[in-house]
Image (spheres, rainbow, N blue to C red):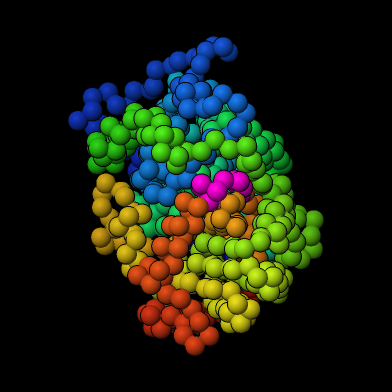
Amino acid sequence: MTTLLLALLCACAPTVAHRVAALPPVAEVPDCDRPAEARTFGADEATPIATLRHLLSPGDARTGATVMEQGADALLTRAWLTESAARTIDLQYFIFAADNVGLVATDTLLRAAERGVRVRLLVDDTLAHGDAELLASLDVHPNLEVRVYNPGLNVGRSGVDAAAALVTDFRGVNQRMHNKVLLVDGEAAITGGRNVANAYFDFDRDFNFRDRDVLLLGGAVAQVQDSFDAFWAHPLATPIATAMRRAPDLAPEAVWTGLHRHGCDPKNVLPVFRTAIPREPDRLAARATTGALQWLDDVRYVSDAPGKNAEASSLSGSGLSTAALMDLVRGARTSVDIQTPYLVTTALGQRLFADTVARGVRVRILTNSLAATDNVAAFAGYRRGRETMLRAGVELYEYRPDARIRAKLLTSPRRVHRKASFGLHAKSMVVDGETLVVGTFNLDPRSANLNTEGIAILRSPELAGEVRALMEREMSPENAWRATLDDVPDNDATLLRRGQAWVSALVPTSLL
């Protein structure tokens, strides 16, 4: 999706700070709006997360890693980590929504700050589906700081300001921070495709994403922390009060109380979900026992530098994440399996995959069909290069919106998958069945040239094999259509979508 479309979306997003501040007390949970009880941990005192890591760890510098396929499970892990944080919580997200999941997450962060945890939240300026005034109210808390990456298009700007920025600095406003990171106490990190919003955790009633994260413990978490700290210290990371250019017109304490009331309401946090949070350490221990949580010698976190390609004069460029992914494909010996929601190939990418197939490497890519995609413009870009990729020998599969596997992958206790549409959002690669990549990188020019991206690279035949087996299942006919030179599934989409794709073909590939 282009930044212009995102800017228009943000301009239409509802403001929720006033609604939150006006929420009445929750009768079922007396005193739920009280601040969390303050607690401090001594320098030598073991925190809950450190205790868990040491219980699971073989006692060396290796990295614990487990893949989180199901949205509800990924949300439970995040909830336990933030509720167990003792010293620090750092978050870096492209989308931090003000829907139910976003508001509950915001309340959890506020409660952590109230009990003495230092919380730092870095959000991209597009802030799709978010509420800048709500976040600005949080920023007033002495233990909670919010910064906005590369402001100038949305936060604190009018539609006229946004239009002027697009005209005068088109390349600059298209440089977005697409990283997605949660860091707790420097001991645990989650990264991958999920933003913070209902649709990434199986809680949306209309459309949910099939996504993937990886939880890291110890070891390479330090690399993730170094990347976050670099972004936080960069001049593009602007305090939200500066970006807003005016003080919130609400008393911050009223917003904080409203957030607590929202988070306490059983309609917003189901009791079955709340009671499952304390059991998360047992679930992680079980994963370690079964081998789903591995301790690895070779884990790398590769992130683009903040301000990526800021000095370039065009919409081209490169980055550390792009180079790392290309090196992995060039080094493949037998197979490359990829899941990406958006597959927009340039001549460079087409040559890379053609050369890889010519070496005898099998290349399979699963992406969204026109019927399943949330981004018709990106699909139009994919369609431009589809025939070239097929002629090169790349196997292409397109996700079905009615994929049968969604009953396995969508596990929200609300059971929304019975009615909701379904689309791919996971960004992953398995090389030779031995190396697993989970991150934020879409195979498109925007990820390569404009957005900052982050990827975790794990050398693990066990985890790579686990993910590849699931990829193969998702490529099966009940879950995906195979595109061939003689047959593509575009006509399975509605006439409206086909028309939208035709119009979207006017968008330049460099912006997709």
- Rendered residue at 63%/78% (across/down): 392
User: In the picture, residue 497 is in which quadrant?
Assistant: bottom left
71 displayed left or right of 338: left
132 displayed left or right of 298: left
Residue 17 among magenta residues: no
Location of residue 304 in the rendering, given as x and y in whole percent from the top left corner:
69, 49
Q: Give the quarter of the figure containing the C terminus.
A: bottom right
Residue 483 higher or lower than 53, as above or below: below
55 displayed left or right of 509: left
Residues rendered magenta in the picture: 455-464
Viewer-side residue, 254 vs 269: 269
Viewer-side residue, 460 vs 166: 460
User: In the picture, residue 349 is in which quadrant?
Assistant: bottom right
Viewer-side residue, 148 vs 268: 268
Residue 65 higher or lower than 395, as above or below: above
- Rendered residue at 47%/82% (across/down): 488
- Rendered residue at 58%/52% (across/down): 434
Res 246 seen here: no
Residue 257 higher or lower than 500, as above or below: above
Res 298 seen here: yes
Location of residue 113 in the rendering, given as x and y in whole percent from the top left corner:
48, 26
Q: Give the quarter of the figure containing the N terminus.
A: bottom right
- Rendered residue at 67%/57% (across/down): 328
Residue 457 among magenta residues: yes
Location of residue 467 in the rendering, given as x and y in whole percent from the top left corner:
48, 53
Q: How many marks?
A: 0
Location of residue 146 in the rendering, given as x and y in whole percent from the top left corner:
56, 37
Q: Residue furthest toward the left?
A: 28
